[in-house]
Image: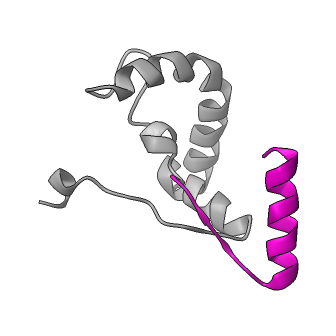
């Protein structure tokens, strides 16, 4: 988080206000579903192709924690948001609901 976001979070904490975590799964990046060789369809493929090489160590650490705890990467990412005092609202594609 940047300085402004950190200050905002501190003020909200002092007032008992919980923030809603925007995209707690990082548009799917933190789910383990995608890699530099497995990209999503559409415009996110370009974005993910640029982002994934730089967050490899983060994803490796997330995967290790998930495996040690017998949880999914998504569960660990969502729990991290909760532990930081935010309210995560993950989304799901309607095609996955069927």
Above or below, 59 against 81 in this view is: above
x and y, in percent, of residue 93 in the image: 25, 52
Residue drawn at 55 percent across, 23 percent down: 51
Span shown in magenta = 1-23
Which residue sits furthest bottom? 16
Above or below, 13 against 49 in this view is: below
Residue 31 in view here: no
Residue 75 in view here: yes
Q: Is 35 situated left or right of 63 in this image? A: left
Q: Quadrant of residue 76?
A: bottom right
Q: Quadrant of residue 37?
A: top left
- Is residue 98 highlighted in magenta? no
x and y, in percent, of residue 83 in the image: 71, 67
Q: Is 1 situated left or right of 68 in this image? A: right
Residue drawn at 88 percent across, 59 percent down: 7
x and y, in percent, of residue 65 in the image: 64, 46
Which residue sits furthest left? 98
Residue drawn at 48 percent across, 37 percent down: 29
Q: Is 15 situated left or right of 54 in this image? A: right
Residue drawn at 69 percent across, 76 percent down: 18
> The C terminus appears in which quarter of the rendering?
bottom left
């Amino acid at each position: 988080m940047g300085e402004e976001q950190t200050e905002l979070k501190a003020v909200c904490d002092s007032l008992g206000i919980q923030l809603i975590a925007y995209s707690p799964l990082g548009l799917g990046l933190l789910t383990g579903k995608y890699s530099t060789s497995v990209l999503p369809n559409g415009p996110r493929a370009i974005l993910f192709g640029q982002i994934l090489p730089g967050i490899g160590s983060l994803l490796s650490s997330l995967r290790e924690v998930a495996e040690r705890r017998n949880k999914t990467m998504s569960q660990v990412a969502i729990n991290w948001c909760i532990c930081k005092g935010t309210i995560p609202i993950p989304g799901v594609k309607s095609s996955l609901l069927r």
